[in-house]
Amino acid sequence: MDKRGARFGTIVALVAVVFSLRSAPAGAQAVPKQLRIAVGIDADTLDPAGQTTTTVANMVDYFFETLVDMDYAKNEVGPRLATQWQTSRDGLTYTFQLRQGVTFHDGTPMTAAAVKSTFDRLLDPKTKVPLRGALLAGIKTVDVVDDTTVRFSMSQPNPLLLRNLTYTTTAIISPAALARAGDRFGLAPVGAGTGPYTFKEWRRGESILVERTPTYWGKKPSFEEVLFQVVPDAGTRETMVLAGNVHLAMLPPAPDIKNLRKNPRVTLVEAATDRVIFLAMNNQWGPFKDARVRQAMNYAINKKALLTSILFDLGTVEASACPAMMFGHSPMQEGGWPYDPAKAKQLLAEAGYRDGFDVEFLAPKGRYIQDFEFAQGAAAQLRNVKIRATVSTMDWPTYVATITQPVDRSRTQLFILGWAWVVLDCDGVLFGQFHSSQQPPSGLASAFYKSEKVDDLLVKARTTVDVAQRATLYKDAQTQIWNDAPWVFLWSQKWYVATVKNLEGVHITPIEKWDAIYATWK
Amino acid sequence: MGRYIVHRLALALLTLVGVTVVIFLLIRLIPGDPARIIAGLLASDDEVRRLRVDLGLTHPLHVQYLIFFTGLLHGNLGISAATRAPVLEEIALRLRPTVLLAVSSIAVATLMGLAAGIVSATRRYSILDYVAMTLAVLGVSIPVFWLGLMLMLLFAVYLHWLPAGGYGTPASFILPTIALAAFSMGIIARITRSSLLETLSQDYVRTARAKGVPRHGVVLRHALKNALIPVLTVIGLQFGTLLGGAVLTETTFAWPGMGRLLVNSILSRDYPVIQGIVLTFAAMFAVVNLLIDLLYAYVDPRIHYG
């Protein structure tokens, strides 16, 4: 062996030594006292009323509870702090019987008075409640009937009310704890909840710590403490779960998903959600005014190919504007609009665009799974039918400012948007995205689609109590929207977390939350 | 000297007032509505409008600036639009991790950089020189997020020696310090080498050698001290930059520092926090620069201020 070979041999030996030093991965260990979860963002507020972001609400759910709970397996509303409820025939009165013997973490009892004060606060315009309009529409007053009974009186029926009351925003707060915390309630809601875990400490920018509630009324979780660690970088979250520094990491990098699915040291938990991803066309802009052009756009894009090759199958092609798990969903066409470039060309020719046209295509970067990346793929497919799309991106606040310009000032032509609602009902996506009253600046129906028929159906659907009738109204609305094609209908996204192998019983809910309160260690 | 310091501080104060105006206008020039971003896409227009009033965004610009500036004179940087906590508190929470990381990185970078620079200069064109200068070039040119991820893979995922990310234990400092120090170390090493080489070729060094001063004495006592001025300048600039928070390092290592807070605030258009942080950075930079200038006088007695 010559000298250089010897030197190389030494290096190899050194590397071998270094790698032999690696200790065994965290297997066959005792149950850790603390479950550590890597989250991508820090909270802005821990006040349930102030929630805007699902991941933050997800953490708040550990220590606050709502009146009713969503059973995603059965897709129906179940009991939580309320054990039973009755709805009046006209849909104007709801009466809730509260669970008895529940105390807040500060020791005060959870009573009808506490429920009333929670909702009085939510309805008070002085309280910052970003989702007020979305969740509390129609509630006139909330009254104490007796110590364990409350009555909600409505100014108009709201068929969504029960589902809305499952969302974090409406969680019940201890009036005593709220008064004690004053202005700092959102930063340190000490003792204010009833949940299986109790809020302990929020180190801003770093972590949130909760500990098991000794006096919890329901089933006790396995872990004594849960630490939510703020890890903004997806690659770092993945590394931390691989190193065993955390036990669960939300949203590892999408391009690594295939490897993680095969990695024996971690479990990838993934599930479909209600977030629809679509290309919004400005229906008031040039070629997109013509429904045939919009239909051609739908024929020109191969959704399945984009999903498989660019999104690593982290999505499901949607068969309607309202995604599959929503109440009122009605599939229009399995597998979405078929991929048919010839048909697209024919429709374009009929509309007078035999030579295609130029279009500005806006895509965010890192907001939705592989967004900017699949925009390139979609643009390439559009080029095959002579639609010349130029993809560009901008930071999120600028993006939002751009797509929320009113129609006379809007410069948008084609852009990516994802829309998810916090409760599983078609109202959230259809009314918000297609009712003409919701066009910017008053809402985010930024495709500027307008159909009197759809407007009419959607208003009826949100005030009708009868379930079967609502389903029919939504079916009609979805049919009209599907055929008018104001969007290029794409897919609904999956949501996913990676956990260490020992952690079991972690689920993903359809509203982009992880469900790990009752996870166990094996 | 005393008068010089007062003069410099007064100038720094004036600069800071300029900074308030520039940053105030600059962040309002970039598009994006803070109220809409903070309230989220699902918030109704009423809520967004109410928030806009709450945040004081409905006042004309000059009124907004006056409110901000009057608050500043009272030592009040305002309230974060996102968390509703005082901006001073938000900054204070992140200052410690940032300063600690900056100090440990600049210490490591200075020690290693100086050592590598001295070795390269005195053993020019030797294998040690090549190794040191290759490392220096790598340190300057490897992107910190990549270096960070590689360090994590080796020391956290394979070896299980150190945590991959997070802040707190002494062990958690090691990887971010190395990742962050690499760049400064490279620059310090290169500047030390070239500056020292230049000094070593001067007449007085030859004289010192001729009269029989031991080699290390010549280098360390006679040459190094004279070669140090440009090195100090670079160390000062590097330290000022590190104090400004290392966004990429902080993001890669989940470090709860100022750089990340600044980027998050920009992404949520949290004007009061952006203003507060930029002002803090500017103030720290001014102080570090002043200290470095004073150090010149110590290193080179020919320089004096007055």
Image (cartoon, rainbow, N blue to C red):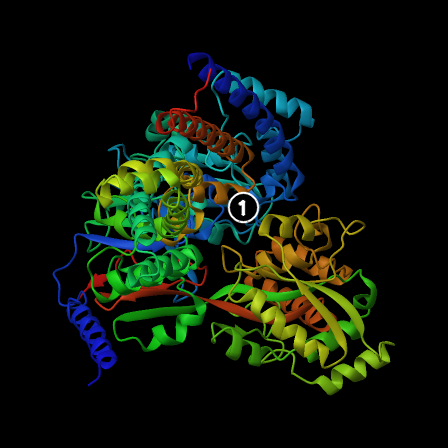
Question: Foreground: A433 or A156?
Answer: A433
The answer to whether residue A514 is seen in the rendering is: no
**In the displayed structure image, the side of residue A481 where residue A47 appears, left or right:** left
Q: Residues within 10 Å of mark 1 (few under 14, many from 20)?
A: some
On the image, numbered disc 1 is attached to which residue? B267
Residue A202: give x, y in percent of width and height. 32, 39
Looking at the picture, does residue A511 appear above or below residue A334?
above
Residue A249 picture quarter: bottom left
Q: Residue at x 62, y 31 (%)?
A: B22
Q: Residue at x 60, y 72 (%)?
A: A490
Residue A25 picture quarter: bottom left
Question: Foreground: A142 or A262?
Answer: A262
The answer to whether residue B222 is seen in the rendering is: yes
Amino acid type, label 1: Leu
Q: Quadrant of the C terminus of chain A?
A: bottom left
Residue B33: give x, y in percent of width and height. 63, 41
**In the displayed structure image, the side of residue A211 where residue A388 appears, left or right:** right
Question: Foreground: A100 or A222?
Answer: A222
Query: Chain for mark 1?
Result: B
Judged from the image, the secondary structure of the residue bearing numbered disc 1 is helix
| Count of numbered tags | 1
Residue A323: give x, y in percent of width and height. 55, 68
Q: Quadrant of the N terminus of chain A?
A: bottom left
Residue B207: give x, y in percent of width and height. 32, 39
Q: Residue furthest right?
A: A352
Q: Residue at x 56, y 35 (%)?
A: B271
Residue B225 picture quarter: top left
Q: Residue furthest front?
A: B210
Question: Foreground: A71 or B171?
Answer: B171
